[in-house]
Image (cartoon, grey):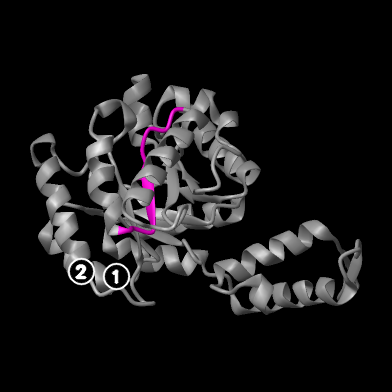
Amino acid sequence: MMLRSLLFVPADSEKKLAKVADSAADAVILDLEDSVSAARKAEARLMLADFFGSLERTEKTPRLIVRVNALDTGLTDDDLKSVVPLVPDAILLPKAGNGADLQDMSARIAVLEAESDIEDGLIKLHALMTETAGGLLNAATFSGKTSRLEALAWGGEDLAAAIGASSNRNETGAYTDVFRLARSLTLLTAADAGVDAIDTVFTNYKDEDGLKRECEAAVRDGFSGKMAIHPAQVPVINAAFTPPPGDVERAKTIIQLFEDAGPDAGVLSLDGKMIDRPHLRQAERIVRRAGLDPKSL
């Protein structure tokens, strides 16, 4: 499973929904939250149901993730009652405040899975964990709360509004300290939870060079993928998060060396250099990003 690119699509845009099946993104986030006005929430749910009903899902269809409204809006249950029977690949919870929110969401999804005769745990959970001050302060509570959790992402726009910041970047275009902290905590929390870390959107969709630089920094630091707000961003993100063939072949070699050495293998040698278990974990990450299963090489 690859989650290099995750493209936001408003759930109330018939025109944009019609393009989902042909999207080059690994996943499409069908949005019921920020991109849908309060007056159109109910209509967006109906449009989403029509979309799922008419879509022929194949291996080439992007993974379908639905962003519901936050738990403090009073809209979450209506969203879930409409969405869960459609069997999306995952639900994205915005403004997650702590690990208890993840447990709460997982339980609500589980009840609706049972009512719809859907396999328990089939629908995964993603969470935006840095959109509120509480989300940052409670980062350590997100790990180990539900096996349904698949990815953690961070966002800087809502956080700026929450703390009263006039901007999340300084005069050079770099994130200011609070937002760098949010980014770092997302990486660390995802690693602790054993799930994917997803980088936030790059809002200037016309700045391809800036997007490329930000993607390269995300890959360097350990993010698994990046969210997009425009289809034109998807090829840039996919290219950045797809490992070069040489890196993939080396990773496959490392995995094979440890497989041949057996479960008790500690330190091995490759090309005259020592490799150990951290190298193996990194190799497994690389082959997963290349769309391969480390266990079936």
The residue identified by callout 2 is: 19
Residue 151 position (above or below residue 139): below
Residue 65 drawn in magenta = no
Is residue 246 toward the left or the right of residue 126 in the image? right
Q: Position of residue 210 (x, y in %)?
A: 40, 54
The answer to whether any part of residue 205 appears in the image is no
- Whether residue 261 sits left or right of residue 285 in the image: it is right
Could you tell me the amino acid type at mark 2? Lys
Tag 1, which secondary structure? loop
Q: Which residue is mark 1?
A: 23
* Quarter-of-image position of residue 295: bottom right
Q: Are marks 2 and 1 in contact (CB under 8 Å)?
A: yes
Q: Amino acid at mark 1?
A: Ser
Q: In the figure, 205 relative to 295: above or below? A: above
Residue 44 at what x, y percent from top left? 14, 48
- Residue sitting at x 60%, y 55%: 220
**Quadrant of the frame with the C terminus:** bottom right
Q: Residue at x 50, y 48 (%)?
A: 148
Residue 96 lies in the magenta-colored region = yes
| Vertical side of 261 occupied by 210: above or below | above
Q: Which residues are magenta?
A: 87-97
User: What is the C-alpha distance between the residues marked 2 and 1?
Assistant: 6 Å
Circle 2: element type: loop
The image shows residue 229 at horizontal and vertical percentages of: 29, 53
**Which of 111/279 is in front?**
111
Q: Is residue 174 above or below residue 220?
A: above
Q: Position of residue 110 (x, y in %)?
A: 41, 45
Q: In this view of the protein, can residue 253 be seen by the observer?
A: yes
Taking the image as shown, residue 224 lies to the left or right of residue 95, namely right
Residue found at x 54% / y 42%: 146
Magenta stretch, main secondary structure, is: loop
